[in-house]
Image (tube, grey):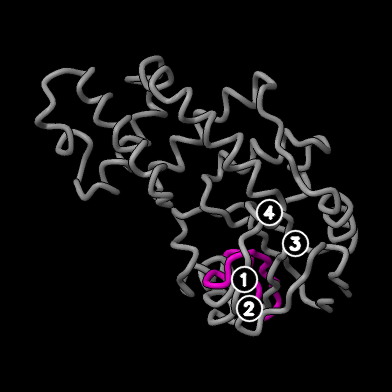
Amino acid sequence: MIEFYGRGLLLDIEGTTASVAFVYDVMFPFVRRELDAYLESAWGTPELELVLRYIAQDAGSDSFAEWTQDDATEEAKRQRVSAEMTRLMDDDVKATGLKQLQGLIWKAGFDSGELVAAVFDDVPDALERWNAAGKDVRIYSSGSVAAQKMFFEHTNHGNLLPMFQGHYDTTTGPKKEAQSYRTIAGDFDFEPSQILFLSDVVAELDAAREAGMRTGLCYRPGNAPVENANGHTAIESFDQISIG
């Protein structure tokens, strides 16, 4: 049980509010299936061009033009992007450009109704309780902010997006670095000690605790076993959080 009397809650998504299986078995395969078709249809659009800059920067170049300077045709450039995105997904790299591109592709799936986000059954009631108690509830995930909003807008429990007051992704900073959590606390405009961060990843919780936040380790069905909780209080459900 976690007793929390602070003002804000910061939540991870995968393995915390939703199952790892849904992300890996449904959402990621959807991106792989639609990747090339999306790149072809969206090529040259402003929203994709912004993401391509992130992808090039992740690859160590200053610009997309520099990164693809050896590619003679637009098709060759698209193939370079597709190959790099596939490599990053194969290696499970939390690159900002990949996450931004995944968000764009997932939008089509959520809009069509093919994708429906599967959140754990205890999540909607907990969000209602926390909001009713005046808590400021936000999300910090490696998935892009746009993808986070689509995810919670299209869940198996309906539209949960109004329950959140803010969203953060890796453009704020890496999830395993304490400075990222200090930055987020500053955006909350709370002292870090007034924020409870919930995640299934011990290294993320370590970073949040170093920044001064309270932490809770989520043991959800399908999560990888945790050999060392490193002092973080473990919970199996948001029902095990008492707020005041």
Question: Is 195 within the magenta?
Answer: yes
Amino acid beneath label 3: Asp
In the displayed structure, would residue 176 be above or below residue 121?
A: below
* Horizontal arrangement in the rendering, residue 156 relative to residue 179 (left or right): right
C-alpha gap between disc 3 and disc 4: 28 Å
- Of tags 2 and 1, the one toward the viewer is 1
Circle 3 — which element? strand
Spot occupied by residue 60 in the image (x, y as percentages of width and height):
21, 50
Amino acid beneath label 2: Ala
The residue lying at 64 percent from left, 35 percent from top is 150
Question: Is 25 within the magenta?
Answer: no
> What residue range appears in magenta?
187-204
Spot occupied by residue 79 in the image (x, y as percentages of width and height):
26, 25
C-alpha gap between disc 2 and disc 4: 17 Å
Spot occupied by residue 51 in the image (x, y as percentages of width and height):
37, 36
Asked which quadrant contains residue 132, the reply is: bottom right
The residue lying at 25 percent from left, 47 percent from top is 59
Label at residue 222: 4
C-alpha gap between disc 3 and disc 2: 26 Å
C-alpha gap between disc 1 and disc 4: 12 Å
Amino acid beneath label 4: Gly
C-alpha gap between disc 2 and disc 1: 6 Å
Image marks 1 and 4: residues in contact by CB distance under 8 Å = no
Amino acid beneath label 1: Val
Q: Which of marks 3 and 1 is nearer the N terminus?
A: 3
Residue under label 1: 226
Image marks 3 and 2: residues in contact by CB distance under 8 Å = no
Seen from the viewer's position, the closer of residues 133 and 159 is 159
How many other residues sit within 10 Å of disc 2, few (<14), some (14-19) or many (≥20)? some
Residue under label 3: 136
How many other residues sit within 10 Å of disc 1, few (<14), some (14-19) or many (≥20)? few
Quadrant of the snapshot with the N terminus? bottom right
